[in-house]
Amino acid sequence: MANLLDLKIGQKAIIADCIDERLPVKLMELGCLPGNEVQLLQVAPLNDPLYYLVAGNRIAIRRETASLICLDL
């Protein structure tokens, strides 16, 4: 299954049900929940972090954490 690392800049996807238990609660509070749309906005110069738009929030997520969030492409 795809995760946030598979998105290209500008690409959108829907967060799937397979969110890992290790996902920080703060990300869930910001909208990283199943069924919400996510879009990759920008990649930092050294490829970490990645900047996403989720539920109207612009969020910077480290690559390690982004790999935990599964998507329906």
Image: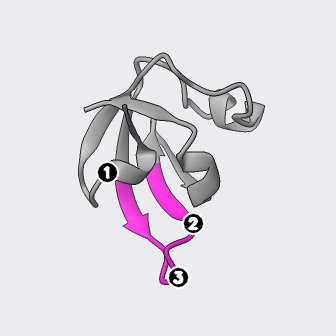
- The x, y position of residue 22, in whole percent, is 74, 33
Q: CA distance from mark 1 to mark 2?
A: 14 Å
**Which of disc 3 and disc 1 is earlier in sequence?**
1
Q: Quadrant of the N terminus?
A: top left
Q: Would you name the residue on which mark 1 appears?
A: 7
Q: Would you name the residue on which mark 3 appears?
A: 46
Q: Secondary structure at mark 1?
A: loop
- Specify whether residue 61 is in view: no
The three-letter code of the residue at mark 3 reads Leu
* Part of the protein shown in magenta: 40-52
Horizontal side, residue 60 vs residue 9: left or right: right
Q: Secondary structure at mark 2?
A: loop
Residue 31 falls in which quadrant of the image?
top right
Residue 68 covered by magenta stretch: no
Horizontal side, residue 73 vs residue 4: left or right: left
Q: How is the image coloured?
A: one colour
The residue drawn where x is 40% and y is 17% is 35
Horizontal side, residue 2 vs residue 67: left or right: left
